[in-house]
């Protein structure tokens, strides 16, 4: 039993703890107490999250707001406070937190169409429930996370430095990114002009960050709130499309298998707008296709940037994996551009 558990106001004495889940960032354990209550203990990775107290303050504020909006208590994560009333324990320079386990729930690593729709419902509902929360109250725990022009600046530096000596082998991919640099300013320019509102955003809108009811498979709540911060709603939408509407793995080498599935895109649009369409502005709704292309382009550029730098950010298990990842994203961007009229039409006709 980890001694840090004594810091938290659990319902009874803990009797067991064991590794839990498949997350790669924070260490996670399932804790069982003598009265049968179950909790999630997490060690916060401060190498990734360098402002853990600001991060926890964000989670406190957002979960408290969400709790006012849900009828099922499983609809929002419940932090367990320490005996001192804090949302985290600091022991030996290490940060820890505890959540109540969301009972009768399940998490999926991949999705069929029905689950993909439900994940869209969940993230749309998350956005809708937080539409009246003042996003500027939240700390930007990872500065410029989805600032695409800033990502372009980093890309230009990586090309100029060519630290891993790979620049000459990826001229076609570099040209692809540079050809779309003007597009990269679309959303930030609209935000600067006051036409896109600052929202509470999740910033990791994958299927495995939604808990589903184990009986009905209906979406219960959004989890992994570490990257919750101020941002643009269309980027959250776009990141979900980037990952969920692709027909292949992110590092697929055979690009003939990589396609942007327009019907999956339509499925997600319908689910997302069914729960948050009423709280989005006309401009936000119109920019949903731009968000999908922007996040896909940005992610591909980040993979290519890391390939040029020598694979210093994203973990790789083989030579050229980041380049393969970049190429899959660029293929998706190309197919989005081919289907651009249809993508916009789907949004216009939905809800």
Image: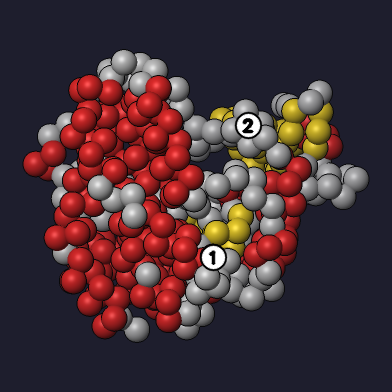
* Foreground disc of the pair 2, 1: 1
Foreground residue among 267 and 180: 180
Foreground residue among 63 and 158: 158
Measured along the vertical axis of the image, is residue 107 above or below residue 73? above
Does dot 2 land on a helix, a strand or a loop?
Answer: loop
Q: Residue at x 23, y 62 (%)?
A: 264
Q: Residue at x 79, y 26 (%)?
A: 93
Measured along the vertical axis of the image, is residue 264 above or below residue 84? below
Q: How is the image coloured?
A: secondary structure
Residue 3 place in picture, x, y as percent = 79, 27
Q: Residue at x 59, y 63 (%)?
A: 200
Left or right relative to 55: residue 278 = left
Q: Quadrant of the C terminus?
A: bottom left
Q: Quadrant of residue 330?
A: top left
Left or right relative to 37: residue 3 = right
Does dot 1 land on a helix, a strand or a loop?
Answer: helix
Q: CA distance from mark 2 to mark 1?
A: 33 Å
Query: Which label was assigned to residue 192?
Result: 1
Q: Residue at x 51, y 80 (%)?
A: 279
Left or right relative to 97: residue 120 = left
Residue 171 place in picture, x, y as percent = 21, 30
Query: Which label was assigned to residue 248?
Result: none
Q: Is residue 159 visible?
A: yes
């Amino acid at each position: 039993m980890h001694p840090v558990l004594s810091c938290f106001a659990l319902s009874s004495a803990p009797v067991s703890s064991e590794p839990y889940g498949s997350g790669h960032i924070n260490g996670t354990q399932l804790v069982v107490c003598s009265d049968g209550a179950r909790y999630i203990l997490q060690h916060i990775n401060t190498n990734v999250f360098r402002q853990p107290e600001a991060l926890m303050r964000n989670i406190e504020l957002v979960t408290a707001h969400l709790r006012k909006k849900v009828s099922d208590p499983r609809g929002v994560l419940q932090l367990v406070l320490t005996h001192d009333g804090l949302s985290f324990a600091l022991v030996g320079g290490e940060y820890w937190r505890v959540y109540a386990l969301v009972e009768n729930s399940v998490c999926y690593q991949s999705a069929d169409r029905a689950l993909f729709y439900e994940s869209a419902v969940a993230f749309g509902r998350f956005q809708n429930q937080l539409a009246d929360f003042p996003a500027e109250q939240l700390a930007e725990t990872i500065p410029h996370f989805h600032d695409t022009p800033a990502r372009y600046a980093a890309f230009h530096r990586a090309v100029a430095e060519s630290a891993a000596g790979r620049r000459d082998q990826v001229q076609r991919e570099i040209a692809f990114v540079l050809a779309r640099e003007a597009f990269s300013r679309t959303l930030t320019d609209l935000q600067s002009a006051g036409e896109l509102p600052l929202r509470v955003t999740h910033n990791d809108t994958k299927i495995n960050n939604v808990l589903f009811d184990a009986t009905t498979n209906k979406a219960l709540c959004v989890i992994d709130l570490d990257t919750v911060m101020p941002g643009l709603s269309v980027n959250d939408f776009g990141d979900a499309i980037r990952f969920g509407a692709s027909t292949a793995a992110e590092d697929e080498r055979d690009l003939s298998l990589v396609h942007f599935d327009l019907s999956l895109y339509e499925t997600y649009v319908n689910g997302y707008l069914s729960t948050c369409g009423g709280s989005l502005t006309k401009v936000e709704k119109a920019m949903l296709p731009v968000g999908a292309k922007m996040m896909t382009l940005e992610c591909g550029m980040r993979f290519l940037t890391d390939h040029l730098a020598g694979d210093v950010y994203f973990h790789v298990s083989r030579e050229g994996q980041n380049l393969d990842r970049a190429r899959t994203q660029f293929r998706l961007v190309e197919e989005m551009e081919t289907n651009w009229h249809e993508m916009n039409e789907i949004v216009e006709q939905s809800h």
